[in-house]
Image (tube, grey):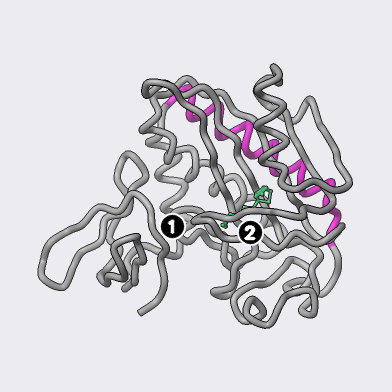
Amino acid sequence: LGRTIKLYDEVDSTQNIAHELVRNGAGEGTLVIAEQQTKGRGRMGRNWLSPKGKGIWMSVVLKPEIPLPFTPQLTLLVAVALCRTIRKLTPEVGIKWPNDLLVRGKKISGILLESSAEDERLNYVIVGVGISANLKEEDYPDDLREKATSLLIERGEPIDRAALVCDFLLQLEDLYELYRDQGFAPIRTLWEALTVTLQRKVTIQTAQGIEEGTAVAIDDMGALLVAKPDGRTVTYFSGDVGQP
Ligand code: BTN
């Protein structure tokens, strides 16, 4: 992965560039990376703050031969790769289901998977990764300052972004190979060891509203199982986990 690298100064979103490159024949492993995004996007239609030179804003093209419903497994795989990478720089990092990376309860990195499929067949996946590397407190708008952090804030010194990208790609490549050889089971075990979501009381916000319960497990598709106060166990395929 990352043997073809497209580096840009400013883009709307590295996701858009990656989609376009694939439509024009770009192969698996193509990496798009930008110093700045003017329309960086997050999960659930949110914006992603991507100031110039302060972070790692990148998208990787994957073409796994899996059925479309298995795509969420890849999200967890990417979270494990990212967590292992960030852990070397700030050891307190953990994964909040499905794929946010938190340090001391604050978000340091996010993952956005966008796939293209026809008739349940996956054509390709664009793995978008944002890492708040060298942002300072004052780079965040007021509403994010309480909720977000960066490697610079945690470590008190700027980090080498190129080395971080390189390490992440190696981790991702390793886990991707493991997934292709042995399926999701080993990835699930690794994810479980790195998460901060399981065995906790959680709120979960979905399109239907906010619900509460105890996060008990993930299943073999990567969905979250939540035990409800009334004794039922509910499976969530997506949603936003918070603390009650
Ligand atoms: C999230 O946590 O909501 C996901 C954030 C993903 C942000 C990255 S930055 C690189 C890539 N390009 C985008 O527009 N978004 C992703």
Disc 2 CB within 8 Å of nearest ligand 1 atom: yes
Assess whether residue 165 is covered by the magenta stretch.
yes
Secondary structure mainly formed by the magenta segment: helix
Residue type of the residue flagged with mark 1: Trp
Task: Identify the residue shown where x is 32% and y is 54%.
Answer: 224
Residue type of the residue flagged with mark 2: Ser
**What is the C-alpha distance between the residues marked 1 and 2?**
13 Å
- Looking at the picture, how far across and down is residue 236, in whole percent? 30, 53
Start-end of magenta stretch: 159-182
CB of mark 1 within 8 Å of CB of mark 2? no
Task: Identify the residue shown where x is 49% and y is 38%.
Answer: 74
- Looking at the picture, how far across and down is residue 117, in whole percent? 46, 26
Q: Could you say which is closer to the camera, residue 242 or residue 157? A: 242
Describe the element under mark 1 as helix, strand or loop: loop
How many numbered discs, if any? 2
Label 2 Cα crowd, 10 Å radius (few <14 / some 14-19 / many 20+):
many
- Looking at the picture, how far across and down is residue 43, in whole percent? 53, 54
Label 1 Cα crowd, 10 Å radius (few <14 / some 14-19 / many 20+):
many
Assess whether residue 91 is covered by the magenta stretch.
no
Q: Which residue is mark 1?
A: 97
Q: Which mark is residue 206?
A: none
Q: Which residue is mark 2?
A: 109
In primary-sequence order, the first of circles 1 and 2 is 1
Q: Could you say which is closer to the camera, residue 144 or residue 217? A: 144
Of the 4 image quadrants, the one containing the N terminus is top right
Q: Is residue 45 left or right of residue 29?
A: left
Q: Quadrant of residue 220?
A: top left
- Looking at the picture, how far across and down is residue 235, in whole percent? 25, 52
Q: Is residue 178 left or right of residue 218?
A: right
Task: Identify the residue shown where x is 85% and y is 38%.
Answer: 7
